[in-house]
Amino acid sequence: MNNRFSVVPIIGIAFTALIAWICIYFWMPTVAYDFFAVYLIAALALVPALLSFRFRWTALGLLGLALTVLGLVAAFSTAPMFRADSYYAMLGTEKQARFNDALPPIDIEQAPLVSQDMALQAMQKRLSEISSLGSQVKVGTPVKQLVRDKLVWVSFLEHGSFFKWYADASTPGYLVVSAHDPADVSLVMELNGAPLKMRYLLSSYFGDRVERRAYMSGMHTMGLTDFEPEIDDNGHPFYIGTTYDHRVGFSGGEATGIAVVDAISGAAKFYKLGTEPAWVDRIQPEEFVLKQMAHRGKYVHGFINLNDEDRMRVDGTLDLVYGSDGRPYWVGGMTSKGTNNGVSGFYFVDSKTKAVRWFKLPSVSQETAAHAVENVNPEKRYRATNPLPFLVNGAPTYVMALRDSQGVARSFGMVDMRNNQVIGVADTLGATLRSYQALRSTNKVSAEVGTDALMRAQEGTVVRIAAEFRNNQTMYYVTLQAADGVLGTIFTGSSDLSVELVLTRPGDKVALSYADSGTRVVAMSKFDNAEIR
């Protein structure tokens, strides 16, 4: 009898160990004091062991009491009602800046207007061309990154199901789509002459699953999230995950570094912030940045703010934009609470360092800009991609592609961020730019938008001048020869800018002003022909 009862605790402890192992292996809880899941698993695992002892009900009661106390501690240390100031501060110190210092100038030849769904469609079409692959694997979620100074979308080939993973063990490569041309698609199946065999993926199971590989490689004491595919400058595939801890009780995730997992070998390595490889673009998860922006706008005057004074909310979703310095930024517009069609300014958050810049720029929302472009030709039923901010002749401008029902880009649109009445839409990006410039040059309000850019004055002799009739007005294009040679810049303007443009001929001495946007074609803000008096 005594022997029988002496075996019961051993069985209970064995069940406790088994439950703990199963939960840890499949749930992968972070083993740290500020993560609640590890306490729940410990409590669940302890139940069989406690039930095997004599004072089982007392022990279970104490366990329940401990969990209740822990839950209260977590609630009070995490609740915004008590920690609003901490949530507000999480985004970090913001630096006031000029919009023109961060936005990249539009490059007509390399404008990155291919959206994620356009890239996915191009990838799926490329995969379907190889029948033997299309039935075995699927295209993962495309991720934008800069590879050897070229902006591309990257997606790893993933397993279609558990049985396909079990049968194949690995996938044969990844896809790359240019961010400016969806027809530029590459299926990479070899690396350094050897076939790619990518085993450690998001769609793999058990020990091959990429999150579990990082967790079991010594990163179990860190929060792990947001594993995304990236390739290095040599084309080698990796998964990049963010490690994090909690800064506000049991919440307030803050990135502490990255977990880099080789998709081929499974080698996993942790990098602290600031020590990561240069080719890694994403460290700060979009989810973290979005929440911190929202908290910055919501708790500007604490938790209790009955009249919503100075409160703001994030307008739509975030975009990953590569700035004029070539660095990746999470860009989000902030709008006053209750406002639906206007933006008060923009946050630019460095996706590597989380350096924050605030640009106060009252403008229309992305949704309003997209609707304005779609309504130019409503009978075509085109739908705009998410508008991206660029500098066009020194003026902040939303630029987007317009797609048909099949997802194919048929035209392009530009909208002045401060005046959605100034819109350019055409079949090519170059024609869209000319249409947009023509409208800006005749709109007084819009013409003043570029004054934040660096204004330049130029004198010279007219080499060429030509006119183009578009949108019921005539645009003039002028090239000059200065003292140091022929300028490569093409200056544009309409007769509304200066009637002297109509009478200007090659060989005339002229003086003009323009906003230096770093592009070849720029709009003039002033024009004077010295030959006409």
Image (cartoon, helix red, strand yellow):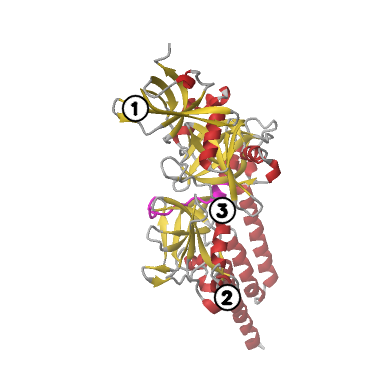
Identified by mark 2, the residue type is Lys
Task: Tell me the distance, in whole angstroms, between the alpha carbons under discs 3 and 2.
Answer: 26 Å
Please, what is the three-letter code of the amino acid marked with disc 3? Gln
Considering the image in quadrants, where does the C terminus appear? top left
- Callout 1 crowding tier (Cα within 10 Å): few <14, some 14–19, many ≥20: some
Location of residue 378 by image quarter? top right
Front residue of this view, candidates 229 and 105? 105
Circle 2 Cα neighbour tier, 10 Å, few/some/many (<14 / 14–19 / ≥20):
some
In the rendered image, residue 299, in percent from the top left (x then y), is placed at 61, 37
Give amino acid for label 1: Gln
Q: Nearer the viewer, residue 222 or 515?
A: 515
**Residue under pointer 2:** 164
Q: Mark 3 and mark 1: span between their CA atoms?
A: 43 Å
Q: Secondary structure at mark 1?
A: strand
Label 3: few (<14), some (14–19) or many (≥20) C-alpha neighbours in 10 Å = some
Mark 3 or 2: the one toward you: 3
Residue 113 rendering spot, x and y as whole percentages: 53, 47
Going 66% across and 52% down the picture, which residue do you hit? 405
| Precedes in sequence: disc 3 or disc 1 | 3
